[in-house]
Image (cartoon, grey):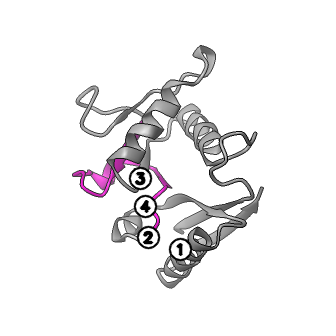
Amino acid sequence: MKQVTFYVMKSYYLSNSNLNTNTLLSHLSRKYWYQRKKVLVYCENKIQAIYIDDILWEQPLDAFIPHNIIGEGPNSGAPIEIAWSQNEINLTSYDILINLFFKFSNIFLNFKEIIDFAPYEEDYLKELARVRYKEYRKFGFKLNIILL
């Protein structure tokens, strides 16, 4: 069965927080890489994709996460690839989608497992997450919520 795990986070974007989206994204990317899963991090735009690429490069040497922006790096890709809506994506080559895209996209339907994020306090982003939640439910995804 297809499933989505929503991480509801109190400090969604705050960089001075010990637990924010970037920290959790790094942790989940590493976790899935260790499990030999191929992950697509789906961003809102190229600027965000480059930012996420930088975040993953800044990990300590003992916590390196092999990744690249889609279309860069080796022909076979990397275990963690970063893309945005204008990229051509071979959707069949990934096990997991980590979603950073604000709106629901039909490409989500190609994944068996999706990680998504929702802010606890920011009303506009919370409302967009609620819309995605309803769309996932409409398409039969099993929904899990983890409050952080």
94 is within the stretch colored magenta: yes
Q: Which residue is mark 2?
A: 103
Number of residues whose C-alpha sits closer than 10 Å to that of mark 2, classed few (under 14), some (14–19) or many (20 or more): some
Q: Are marks 1 and 4 in contact (CB under 8 Å)?
A: no
Q: Are marks 2 and 1 in contact (CB under 8 Å)?
A: yes
Q: Amino acid at mark 1?
A: Leu
Residue 68, above or below 63 = below
Q: Amino acid at mark 4?
A: Phe
Q: Residue at x 64, y 40 (%)?
A: 23
Quick one: label 3 or label 4, which is nearer the N terminus?
3
Q: Secondary structure at mark 1?
A: helix
Number of residues whose C-alpha sits closer than 10 Å to that of mark 3, classed few (under 14), some (14–19) or many (20 or more): many
Q: Residue furthest bottom?
A: 138
Q: Nearer the viewer, residue 97 or 112?
A: 97
Q: Which mark is residue 32?
A: none
Quick one: label 2 or label 1, which is nearer the N terminus?
2
Q: Which residue is mark 1?
A: 128
Say left or right for 97 vs 21: left
- In space, the residues marked 2 and 4 are separated at their CA atoms by 16 Å
Q: Position of residue 141 (x, y in %)?
A: 54, 74
Q: Position of residue 85 (x, y in %)?
A: 30, 58
Q: Which residues are magenta?
A: 80-102
Q: Residue at x 31, y 33 (%)?
A: 77
Q: Which residue is mark 3?
A: 42
Q: Which residue is mark 4?
A: 111
